[in-house]
Amino acid sequence: MTITGRDDPRETLDGELREFLEPEVETAPREVIRASQEAAVLDLVRYAWDNSPLYREHWSAAGVSPDDIRTLDDFTNKVPTLTKADIQAYRARTGDPYGGLLCVDLKDLTSVTTTSGTTSAPELLPEIWNTVPPLAAATTRDLYAHGLRPGDRVIVPVGTFRNYWDDFYTTLGLTPVFVDSWLGQGESLLRAIREHEVAYMQVHLPAIMEFEKLEEKYDLREAFASIKFFAFAGQPMGEALKRKVTEDWGVRIVTYTSAGDTGTAWEGPDLDGFQLWEDTMLPEVLDTITDEPVGDMEVGELIATDLDNRAAPYIRFRSGDLVRVTRLPAPTGRTHARMWFSGRRGDEVVIDGKAIVVGDVWRLVESLPELSDGMFQVIRTDAPMTHLRLRVGYAPERTSDVVDLERRLTDLLGAELGVGVDLALLTLEDILQYSSSVAKFPRMVKK
């Protein structure tokens, strides 16, 4: 693997010179993409039937076998979808820690990581690889598209992001710089960026907050002058915070998200939609009521199928993510599908018969200067709710009167949302203790 691609990874499209790591893949015609997916799916169905006890049981119960699947349309119409609950139920019944998904012998595994555990207990992710782990390897085209090149120095946030990123970076000709990026380490992290002229870093919300604390002491625009871009994931970045990072600090933010737990999807060079590499996964978008495919750019649930995972593939997996997808070519010249995230199934709470979604709360919380980080959680209960219950994080250095802040936020939420509000204010450091992982902070939690 190399981040330089072929000798001249450039293509002229519409009179404009563009760079691609793998031009023949990234700009493949739609009919070529579909034909490749069909071949991969037909092979995958037989492979999973022969090797996964869960799929054999799950499909048999639906009256489906590999003999019934002869086309891609057969696959999307006949193979039943799979939920996380299906995997968990199989695990509870059999004691299999892999939930019946594992298709290889345990001795053949190279590593085992987990999902983030944002919406439920983390799921094991068994992996087979030689040089670079698959999760990291899948980002190569995206990192190249955003400007990383051999010789660039990149931060490895020690103990923060799962998988072997240092090995991956070295393989690409990049130089890893190891730094602790957790709470209280902002100054040492900033020092490393300046001293080593770092070009790239995966950042999480705690790191951004650490940098915020240093705004009065350092010229962050100057300190980040060598940075080509930050990658941000785990949750959406609020608009107020994003403006600060991009406009005040001068840093380009590239967001990535989950591709239905089959890998990651990164914003493209134009920052318009998440790129789904369709040679590695098959995306479907189904109506949440009818389960029928939705039209281009219509909202539905992302159903994802692993095309490059032989260890424990997810096949027609219900991600719970509500998305819009287009398969029309992007202005960048890439022809694979792009996705826009709209929310998650269940990301709403009913207060006295009125549905309140996370985005409604977020917009109001971050509008107050003391709360511009947008740190809050909606607390949901099984019993009928008469008040919107929140815990909200404030920045002590920007807050002179906590009691007044609580009053202003309560009044604002009540007036705009039309419901009663019970809230608890915590410092940003204290509210981070409710994170589900180092990179994930759930916005909807159950008491």
Image (cartoon, helix red, strand yellow):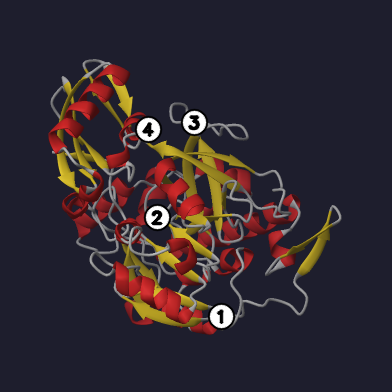
The answer to which image quadrant residue 152 occupies is bottom right
Q: Are marks 4 and 1 in contact (CB under 8 Å)?
A: no
Mark 1 belongs to which amino acid? Leu
> What separation in Å lies between label 3 and label 4 (alpha carbons)?
27 Å
Q: Residue at x 60, y 55 (%)?
A: 268
Q: Is residue 289 left or right of residue 143?
A: left
**Residue name at image x 33 percent, y 63 percent:** 217
Above or below for 138 versus 416: below
Residue 28 location in percent, x, y? 74, 58
Q: Mark on residue 55?
A: 2
Q: Along the line of sight, which residue is nearer the eye, 311 or 170?
A: 170
Look at mark 4 in the image and give the residue it sits on.
363
Give the Cα distance between marks 2 and 1: 36 Å
The numbered mark, 3 or 4, whose residue comes first in the sequence reads 3
Marks 3/2: CA distance? Answer: 24 Å
Which is in the foreground here, disc 2 or disc 1?
Answer: 1
Question: Are the residues tagged 2 and 1 within 8 Å (C-beta)?
Answer: no
- Residue 78 position in % (x across, y down): 52, 42
Instruction: Identify the residue position indicated by label 3 in the image.
Output: 287
Question: In the image, which is nearer the foreground, mark 3 or mark 4?
Answer: 4
